[in-house]
């Protein structure tokens, strides 16, 4: 199930105009509010004005209630239809376009994760406007900051489109509080199904560990682990610390771990404190995932364990231990983690 | 199933450490090593494999930009594409060119070439936009199979396994369609010397966006480009005990 949020800003410009913006958000299939939605709502509120949410799915009732409590959300639009199974962009795009035609929003946004990245550009092209991907800062209603070159540069971008469409990097914005809000709900009609795509199935990695992108502590392994079995060292350490486990692209490519554990430019962006990198050399794409990009200047402490003193990852390490990770035996790692738990 | 269009973008090589220009107008590109966007290589490989499986007849490599992009098209031809199209864009238009403009070009070409499939890379490693495939599909009103890690042609439909945040998702879409290649879709081949030589004889057609009826106007401006905040230098330690001691002294633990 997915949700879109509209934003309306009143009186910010010429008094005859009323501005609105839409935020698109997604739910998991277990019918819970996706965390990144709350970060996206914060970004929408920074643009100024009112925030409206558009929720679409096969069973919206379960999510409408929590969103209505989110601080800063004024109204929720609900569209329920079987064709939204799998939240296919071909089906959701006509819905958002119809909503836009009816309410005339000034801004449309969503969290920059698989769902938002798949849907928003499709929708914006139909409106003949650009999308700004993965923004990390809202400077004003038309100026945003986003990263380029795998987080090695920051671009400040001004958007002169009549509707400003953007996706939001969740880790750059605080989540909106799910309290104090009292949004009204309104049903919207669903356009006829497009019928050109069909959702078959999902295979999600079930994990009781914290979700990578919102985890407070992350332990990541690289090719230095040498096998999927050796990742058990990190799983055990992570379990003791209540940490999430990530991996470099090299480790995923080598088949040690599934793709959803990848941290980096084309994987997940993480902002834990600390981030512990084990057996990772630090090729540029991985560093992009680990660097802090939050608006609030939280320093992410990076701890590196690698036997190669020349590994690029040491350049971003706050603490580097040059040691063969296997020699740093489980008992020593246990010692480290017990000390950390004392905090 | 006859023709596939593949987009290839010329970008700063992924291993290069980029520098921001002193006037903050952009990133230094002059004299810097460029190569084909890694995701585009994967897209080319997938298209060529489909041709080798005899599921499609012809692969056309397309790139938009100044003269230098023909090098990138030649690489695609050396990997097995049949012919190339160079859409000339240069100067201010090239600097301002973004996914919206490119998708208009691809949509126009898809109609002109009567393509059944467009395969693009998921994102370019310079702008990190991840939009062109989705936008092209929208303009053509075609379905989209993005972040593809596995593609299977099944009659008039394509089964796509996609990489999403929690794992993998499988969809089935009708053709014609747009696919965007994710990292694990395949391992691109190296162009062998005989193929590089053969590629020199393959045709690259030349055209301008105006020939395709495409307006390159962009309503997005880059105001400035900055380096990210620098991290303070780190500390090397010899043993886990040292590490623990430092973290204690620092107040982390």
Image (spheres, rainbow, N blue to C red):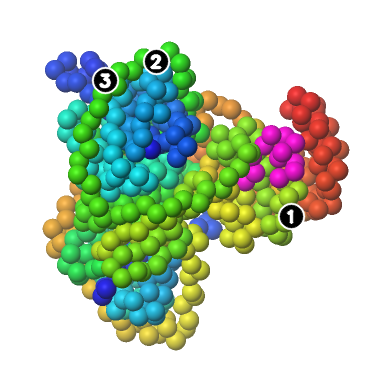
Q: Please report whichever mark, 3 or 1, sits nearer to the chain's N-terminal start.
A: 3
User: Percent from the top left, x then y, of residue B5?
Assistant: 29, 68
Above or below — where is B212 with respect to A4?
below
* Image quadrant where residue A223 sits: bottom right
Mark yes or no: residue A160 visible. Answer: no
> Tag 1, which secondary structure?
loop
Picture residue at 51% right of the left edge, 38% below the top: B228
Q: Which mark is residue A9?
A: 3
Q: Which residues are magenta?
A: A235-246
Q: Please report the residue visible at 50 percent of the width from the left and 61 percent of the height from the top.
A: B184
| Any part of residue B252 in sight | yes
Q: Position of residue A292 (x, y in %)?
A: 56, 36
Q: Are marks 2 and 3 in contact (CB under 8 Å)?
A: no
Q: Which mark is residue A181?
A: 2
Q: Is residue A238 rendered magenta in the image?
A: yes
Q: Secondary structure at mark 3?
A: strand
Label tally = 3
**Badge 3: chain ID:** A
Residue furthest to the top in view is A180
């Amino acid at each position: 199930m997915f949700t879109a949020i509209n934003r309306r800003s009143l009186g910010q410009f010429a008094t005859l105009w009323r501005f609105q913006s839409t935020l698109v958000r997604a739910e998991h299939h277990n019918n819970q509010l996706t965390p990144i939605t709350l970060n996206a709502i914060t970004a929408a509120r920074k643009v100024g004005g009112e925030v409206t949410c558009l929720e679409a799915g096969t069973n919206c009732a379960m999510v409408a209630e929590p969103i209505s409590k989110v601080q800063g959300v004024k109204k929720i639009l609900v569209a329920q239809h079987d064709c939204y199974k799998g939240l296919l962009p071909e089906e959701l795009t006509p819905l958002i376009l119809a909503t836009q035609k009816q309410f005339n929003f000034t801004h449309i946004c969503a969290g920059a994760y698989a769902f938002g990245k798949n849907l928003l550009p499709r929708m914006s092209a139909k409106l003949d406007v650009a999308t700004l991907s993965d923004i990390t800062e809202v400077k004003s209603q038309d100026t945003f900051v986003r990263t380029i070159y795998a987080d090695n540069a920051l671009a400040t971008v001004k958007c002169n489109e009549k509707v400003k469409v953007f996706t939001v990097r969740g880790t750059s914005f605080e989540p909106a509080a799910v309290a104090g809000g009292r949004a009204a709900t309104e049903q919207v009609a669903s356009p006829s199904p497009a019928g050109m795509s069909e959702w078959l199935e999902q295979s999600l990695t079930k994990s009781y560990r914290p979700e990578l992108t919102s985890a407070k502590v992350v332990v990541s392994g690289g090719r230095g682990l040498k096998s999927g079995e050796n990742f058990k060292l990190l799983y055990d350490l992570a379990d003791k610390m209540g940490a999430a486990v990530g991996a470099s692209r090299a480790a995923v490519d080598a088949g040690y771990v599934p793709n959803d554990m990848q941290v980096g430019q084309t994987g997940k962006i993480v902002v834990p404190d600390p981030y512990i990198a084990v057996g990772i050399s630090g090729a540029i794409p991985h560093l992009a995932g680990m660097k802090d990009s939050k608006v609030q200047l939280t320093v992410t402490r990076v701890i590196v364990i690698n036997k190669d003193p020349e590994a690029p990852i040491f350049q971003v390490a706050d603490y580097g231990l040059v040691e063969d990770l296997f020699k740093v035996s489980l008992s020593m790692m246990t010692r480290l983690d017990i000390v950390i738990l004392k905090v | 199933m006859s023709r596939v269009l593949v987009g290839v973008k010329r970008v700063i090589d992924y291993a290069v450490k980029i520098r921001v220009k002193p006037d903050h107008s952009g990133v230094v590109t002059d004299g810097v090593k460029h190569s084909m966007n890694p995701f585009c290589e994967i897209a080319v490989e997938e298209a060529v494999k489909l041709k080798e499986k005899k599921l499609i007849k012809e692969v056309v490599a397309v790139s938009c930009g100044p003269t230098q992009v023909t090098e990138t098209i030649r690489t695609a031809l050396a990997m097995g594409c049949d012919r190339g199209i160079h859409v000339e864009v240069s100067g201010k238009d090239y600097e301002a060119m973004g996914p919206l403009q490119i998708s208009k070009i691809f949509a126009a070409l898809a109609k002109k070439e009567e393509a059944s499939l467009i395969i693009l890379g998921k994102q370019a490693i310079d702008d990190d936009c991840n939009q062109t495939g989705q936008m092209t599909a929208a303009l053509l009103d075609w379905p989209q199979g993005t972040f593809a890690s596995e593609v299977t042609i099944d009659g008039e439909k394509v089964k796509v396994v996609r990489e999403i945040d929690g794992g993998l998702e499988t969809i089935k879409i009708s053709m014609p369609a747009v696919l965007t290649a994710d990292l694990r879709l395949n391992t691109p081949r190296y162009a062998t010397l005989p193929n590089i030589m053969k590629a020199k004889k393959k045709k690259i057609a030349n055209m301008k966006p105006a020939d395709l009826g495409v307006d390159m106007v962009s309503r997005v401006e880059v105001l400035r480009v900055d380096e990210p905040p620098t991290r303070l230098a780190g500390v090397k330690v010899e043993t886990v005990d040292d590490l623990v001691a430092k973290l204690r002294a620092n107040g982390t633990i």
